[in-house]
Image (cartoon, grey):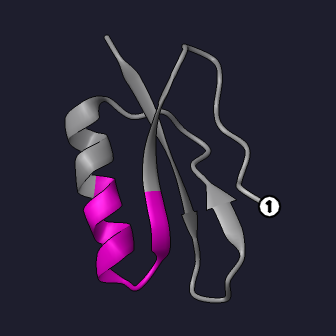
Amino acid sequence: MQNFALTWTDLDDVPRSSAVAYDKPSAVRRKQVLEDVGCSDVQGVETEPGQLPEPAV
């Protein structure tokens, strides 16, 4: 199974990253939710099990 995490910039311009990994369909849904509430730079990142991305600085 492929694992995906998300990185984004929240409404206060604070870089964020997901604390969990998603399967691809779940990552796509979560990405859409973040974009719908106004977050910017939402990116899906393929990860290895046990690894999560750091927020962009």
Q: Crowding near pointer 1: few (<14 within 10 Å), some, many (20+)?
A: few
Asked if residue 8 lies left or right of residue 57, the reply is left
Q: Is residue 11 above or below residue 20?
A: below
Asked if residue 17 lies left or right of residue 6, the reply is right
Q: Is residue 50 above or below residue 16?
A: above
> In which image quadrant can residue 14 be found?
bottom right
Say what amino acid the circle numbered 1 marks.
Val
Asked if residue 15 lies left or right of residue 33, the reply is right
At horizontal 54% and vertical 38% (from top left) the residue drawn is 20
Residue 3 covered by magenta stretch: no
> In which image quadrant can residue 50 be found?
top right
Residue 40 covered by magenta stretch: yes
| Quadrant where the image shows the C terminus | bottom right
At horizontal 35% and vertical 17% (from top left) the residue drawn is 2
Q: Position of residue 45 (x, y in %)?
A: 48, 37
The residue under label 1 is 57
| Quadrant where the image shows the N terminus | top left
Q: Position of residue 26 (x, y in %)?
A: 26, 42
Q: Secondary structure at mark 1?
A: loop
Q: Looking at this rendering, what residue extends furthest in the right direction?
A: 57
Label total for image: 1
Q: Is residue 14 above or below residue 41?
A: below
At horizontal 41% and vertical 85% (from top left) the residue drawn is 38
Q: Position of residue 53 (x, y in %)?
A: 66, 38
Q: Which residues are magenta?
A: 30-42
